[in-house]
């Protein structure tokens, strides 16, 4: 599978607890942090859940 890079571009302050947990599960803990994951359906679903907080870098 292909890998994708995910960057947190907005703060998780004032977000619901579920969205904060999703960011933690992706490995994003700080602003402008970048993590690399395989493009599995599970990861893509988590990215879709917090799409307003992250940016997918190709």
Image (spheres, rainbow, N blue to C red):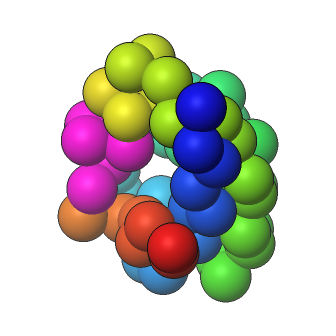
Relative vertical location of residue 27 with respect to residue 36 in this rendering, above or below: above
Q: Image point 41% across, 72% down: which residue? A: 55
Left or right: residue 49 versus residue 6 is left
Q: Is residue 44 magenta?
A: no
Outermost residue toward the front in this view? 1
Q: Image point 27% across, 56% down: which residue? A: 51
Left or right: residue 25 versus residue 42 is right
Relative vertical location of residue 38 with respect to residue 45 in this rendering, above or below: below
Outermost residue toward the top in this view? 42
Could you tell me residue 21's position as x and y percent?
54, 28
Q: Image point 58% across, 70% down: which residue? A: 7
Could you tell me residue 14's position as x and y percent?
35, 57
Residue 13 seen by the camera: no
Q: Which quarter of the image is occupied by the N terminus?
A: top right
Residue 1 seen by the camera: yes
Left or right: residue 23 versus residue 51 is right
Relative vertical location of residue 23 with respect to residue 54 in this rendering, above or below: above
Q: Which residues are magenta?
A: 47-51
Q: Image point 38% across, 43% down: which residue? A: 47
Q: Main secondary structure of the magenta part?
A: helix
Classify residue 5 by image quadrant. bottom right
Classify residue 42 by image quadrant. top left
Could you tell me residue 16's position as x and y percent?
32, 37
């Amino acid at each position: 599978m292909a890998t994708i890079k995910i960057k947190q571009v907005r703060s998780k302050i004032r977000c619901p607890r579920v969205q904060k947990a999703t960011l933690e599960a992706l490995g994003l803990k700080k602003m402008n942090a970048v993590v690399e994951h395989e493009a599995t359906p599970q990861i893509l679903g988590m990215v879709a859940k917090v799409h307003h907080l992250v940016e997918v870098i190709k």
